[in-house]
Amino acid sequence: MRLVSTRVFGRWIKRQLPKTLFGRSLLIIVLPVALMQVAVTYVFFDNHWQTVTSRLSEGLAGDIAWAVESYQEEPTAPAFARLSRRAEESMGLSIALQQGRELPVNRRYSFFAPIDRALQRALSERLDEPFWFDTTRYPAYVDIRVAVPGGVLRVLAPRDRAFATQGHIFVLWMTVATVLLTAIAILFIRNQVRAIERLANAAEAFGRGGEAVAFKPHGAREVRRAATAFLAMRSRIQRHIEQRTTLLASVSHDLRTPLTRLKLALALSEPSKRTDAMKKDVLEMEHMIDEYLAFARGEGGEGLEVVTLRQLIEEVSEGARRAGAEVALDADARLTAEVRPNALKRALSNLVMNAAVHGEHVEIAVRSRPNGGVEIVVDDDGPGIPADRYEEAFKAFGRLDESRNQNTKGVGLGLAIARDVARGHGGDIVLDRSPLGGLRAVVQLPG
C-alpha cells in the first residue's frame, strides 16, 4: 500500500513539474537558491533574532516590574512623579497613572507573531499583576498596561527596547538577492533556450518540407554542435532526395521511350485479343512508372499555400465517382489549411480511389481537431484490413496479398505515398475500422 502511494505521489509530482526546458532549467537554478535563502533566514531568526528579542523583552519586562513594585511600595503622587521622571531619564520609558481605569478587553496581534510571543513570555515571568500590551498601535512605541490598585499603570516603551527592529532589513536584503539572482538566471537561461528553440524550429520546418529558414549555429558549444550536425544532415538528405528524384526521372524517361514505341506499334497493328491484352499490359506498366516516379519525387519543390479543403476534396471525389463509387462529402466550406495542394491532392486521391476500388460507398468528412489542426476522414464499406496489419499496409510495395497478383492494379505505393505526404506536412495517417464496415483512413494535419 505504501509503495502504491509513493508511486501515485511521484506521478503527481511529475505532472506538476514544468514541461518546457526553460521552466525546468529555471526550477533547477532558482529552487536551490530559494531554499538556501529560506534556510539562512530561518537560522538567522531562530538563532540570532529571537535570542536578541528575548533578551530585550526580558530587560523591558524587568524595568516595568521595577516600576510597578516601586509604585506599589509608595503609591503617592510625589513618589510617582519621582518614579516617572527617573524612568524617563534612565530607561526611556514614559509612565502614566490612569486612575479608575481598567485593562482593555480586546487586543490586536502583530502580523509577525514572534514579537508578541517574546514579550508575552517575558512579562508573564516578571509580573504577577494582570497586564495588557499592544505592539501595533504606535509605529515607534509599545503600549504596555499593568493593573495596579486604584487604576492602570500605562508604559510607553520604544520599540527597540522590546525587540530587534532591524530583522526586516535582513529579510528585505535576502528577498532582493533572491529576486536579483532569479532575474539573472532567467536572462541567461532564456538565451540558451532560444538557441535550442531556433534549432527545433529549423528542424520542424525541414521535416515539413517548407522553405529552408535562415539558420546558423548559435548558443552554447553543445547546442552549436547539434546545430552543425543538423545542417550537415539536412544537406545530405537534400542531396539524397535530389539524386533519387533525378535517377527515377531518368529511368522514367528512358522507359517511356520504348513504351511509346510499343503503344504506337500496338495502335497500328490489327485489333485482336492478343493486342488488347498487350495494350492493357503497356498501360499497367505506364501506371507503375507513374507511381514509382511519384513515390521518388515526394513533394518536389512545391510551396505551402492556404487552401479551402472542401474545394480540394471535391476535385478528388470526382475521380472516385467516375470509378462508379457513391461518394458523400461532409466538409465545412470555411475550413482551411496551409498545405502543398498538389501533394495533398495526390495523397487524398490515393486514399479515396483505394476506398472506391474496394467498396461501393465512400464517405469523406473534414473536421477540426480538439488540439488544433484538422483531420480528413475517408470511410468505405469494403472488406477492410485486419487491425494487426494496419502498419503493414503503409509499407512501400506492400499489397497485403501473399500472391502479389499482378492482375491487381498498382504496385502497393498508394498508402505509402499518402502517409509520406501527411508526415511531410507535420501530420500523419492512421487506419481504423469504419462504421460502414470497411476501412477508415484519418489524415491528421497540424494547425
Image: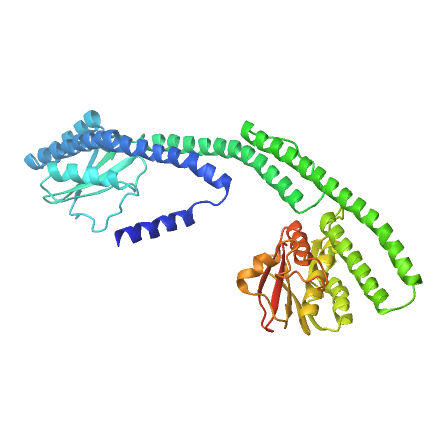
Is 2 situated above or below 173? below
Q: Which of 304 and 315 is in front in this view?
A: 315
Q: Which of 212 and 333 is in front in this view?
A: 212
Is 357 situated above or below 67? below
Q: Most extreme residue toward the left, as rendered?
A: 73
What count of labels does the image hold?
A: 0
Image-based side of 237 in relation to 8, left or right: right
Q: Nearer the viewer, residue 148 or 97?
A: 148
Question: x, y (%) of residue 172?
Answer: 38, 33
Question: x, y (%) of residue 41?
Answer: 31, 33
**Quadrant housing residue 121:** top left
Q: Is residue 164 visible?
A: no
Look at the image and tell me in which quarter the C terminus lies.
bottom right
Q: Is residue 105 visible?
A: yes
Image-based side of 396 in relation to 72, left or right: right
**Quadrant housing residue 417:** bottom right
Question: x, y (%) of residue 281?
Answer: 79, 61
In percent of the image, x 76 and y 50: which residue is there? 293
In percent of the image, x 31 and y 31: which residue is there? 40
Question: x, y (%) of residue 257?
Answer: 86, 50
Q: Most extreme residue toward the top, as rendered?
A: 90
Is 158 situated above or below 276? above
Look at the image and tell me in which quarter the N terminus lies.
bottom left
Is 195 situated above or below 12? above
**Quadrant housing residue 153:** top left
Q: Which of 276 and 365 is in front in this view?
A: 276
In percent of the image, x 46 and y 40: which residue is there? 24
Q: How is the image coloured?
A: rainbow
